[in-house]
Image (spheres, rainbow, N blue to C red):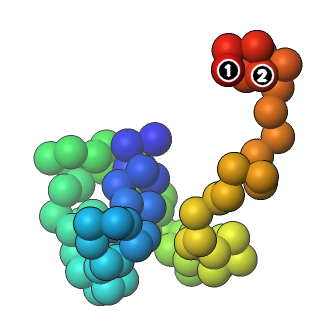
Amino acid sequence: MAFTDTFDALTSRRPYKEPYSMDVVLEILRKEREAHFDPEIVDVFFDHLDYFLHIRTEIGTDPLAIGDVTWSERDLYDM
């Protein structure tokens, strides 16, 4: 989860930063192999990079609006 969260954070626009270029993101992820990320996870990611980038393009990077979320009964109860 940490790896995918980092990938998403680096490639997404945030209120405090613009997204990094894909070249920079991939270099950061390679550099953190074994330091912050399990080498097997990093290797699988790079072995299937085209597929992961396709998924990202299909889904997009726009944040979800509150109306895009389906609430469970538990969520509504806690509000």
Find residue 25 and report its horizontal and vertical position in percent.
Answer: 29, 74
**Which sits in the foreground, 79 or 44?**
79
Q: Which numbered marker is on residue 1?
A: none
Q: Is residue 33 left or right of residue 74?
A: left
Residue kind at label 2, given as amino acid type = Leu
- Dot 1 falls on a residue whose secondary structure is loop
Residue 28, quarter of the rendered image: bottom left
Q: Residue at x 19, y 56 (%)?
A: 32
Q: Which numbered marker is on residue 76?
A: 2
Q: Is residue 76 above or below residue 44?
A: above
Q: Residue at x 27, y 72 (%)?
A: 17
Residue 79 in view, yes or no:
yes
Q: Residue at x 56, y 72 (%)?
A: 61
Find residue 34 and report its horizontal and vertical position in percent.
Answer: 19, 47
**Which sits in the foreground, 23 or 50?**
23
Q: Is residue 60 left or right of residue 18?
A: right
Image quarter in which the C terminus is found = top right
Q: Residue at label 1?
A: 79
- Is the C-beta separation of discs 1 and 2 under 8 Å? yes
Crowding near the residue tagged with mark 2, few <14, some 14–19, many ≥20 C-alpha atoms within 10 Å: few
Q: Is residue 13 left or right of residue 54?
A: left
